Image (tube, rainbow, N blue to C red):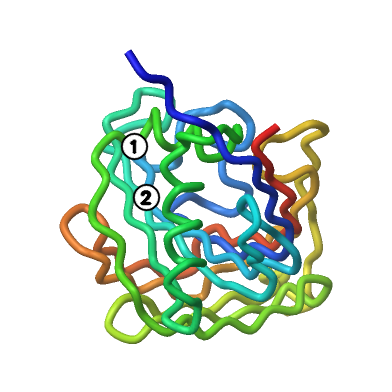
């Protein structure tokens, strides 16, 4: 049987994400999700990256995910959104990376835990992020409207800052925790969400084929 040749890749940049869990997200601590199931998204802007000889600097993409129970029990659904401003070669490279056929812990985990893979969507991805300020907006026409702001003290209204630090984490090593003011997704089937005031995160990422 022929073995598929793996292509070396690396992508690094900024990630914005939100899910249906309470602030802090128990999943980050190997605890059951707040509501017993998981649903959310992550949007990324690549600062620098490549797939083989294909440069991916400045390219954006997003992933939508849902599970009927905790992530580690699997049987999830996933869909990738590719920025229409990327070239066909760049979109093809990102699809290859997301398939996990070329290694990389982040995509290998989600490939195993989300075997139900919907066809990718090509659409404009509007992303604005200020990680230190815990502010972000992500809009994908017809697919997503997401707004993230700092968590505020319920008595004083002051901004509350807290971070999650995971040394050696496969997604991030440090993330700013924020409030997902609203997350409205119409990504299809199990990926339609309408959430308010849930967990949001902003972090750097640096993923590679290993």
Q: Position of residue 47 (x, y in %)?
A: 74, 69
SS class, disc 2:
strand
Q: Residue at 59% x, 54% y: name it.
A: 23
| Label 1, residues with CA under 10 Å away: few <14, some 14-19, many ≥20 | many
Viewer-nearest residue: 5 or 193: 5
Seen in the picture, residue 118 relative to 156 is either above or below; the reply is above
Q: Position of residue 123 (x, y in %)?
A: 36, 80
Residue 186 located left or right of residue 210: left
Q: Residue furthest left?
A: 189
Seen in the picture, residue 98 relative to 146 is either above or below; the reply is above
Seen in the picture, residue 179 relative to 74 is either above or below; the reply is below
Q: Residue at 28% x, 44% y: name it.
A: 77
Indicate which disc residue 139 carries: none
Viewer-nearest residue: 111 or 52: 52
Q: Which residue is mark 1?
A: 114
Residue 110 located left or right of residue 45: left
Q: Position of residue 131 (x, y in %)?
A: 77, 71
Q: Which residue is mark 2?
A: 65
Q: Earlier in the sequence, mark 1 or mark 2?
A: 2
Viewer-nearest residue: 56 or 31: 56
Asked if the residue under mark 2 is in contact with the one under mark 1, i.e. CB atoms within 8 Å, the reply is yes
Q: Residue at 67% x, 66% y: name it.
A: 46
């Amino acid at each position: 049987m022929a073995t598929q040749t793996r292509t070396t890749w690396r992508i690094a940049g900024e990630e914005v994400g939100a899910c249906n869990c309470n602030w802090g997200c128990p999943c980050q601590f190997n605890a059951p999700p707040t509501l017993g199931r998981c649903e959310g998204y992550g949007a990324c802007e690549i600062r620098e990256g490549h797939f083989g000889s294909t440069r991916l600097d400045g390219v954006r993409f997003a992933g939508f995910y849902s599970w009927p129970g905790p992530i580690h029990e699997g049987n999830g659904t996933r869909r990738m959104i590719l920025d229409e401003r990327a070239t066909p070669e760049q979109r093809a490279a990102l699809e290859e990376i997301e398939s996990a056929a070329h290694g990389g812990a982040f995509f290998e985990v989600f490939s195993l835990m989300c075997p139900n893979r919907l066809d990718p969507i090509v659409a404009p991805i509007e992303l604005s992020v200020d990680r230190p300020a815990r502010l972000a907006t992500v809009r994908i026409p017809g697919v997503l409207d997401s707004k993230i702001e700092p968590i505020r003290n319920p008595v004083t209204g002051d901004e509350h800052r807290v971070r999650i630090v995971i040394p050696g984490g496969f997604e991030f090593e440090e993330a700013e925790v924020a409030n997902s003011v609203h997350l409205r997704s119409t990504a299809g089937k199990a990926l339609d969400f309408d959430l308010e005031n849930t967990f949001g995160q902003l972090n750097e990422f640096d993923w590679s084929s290993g």
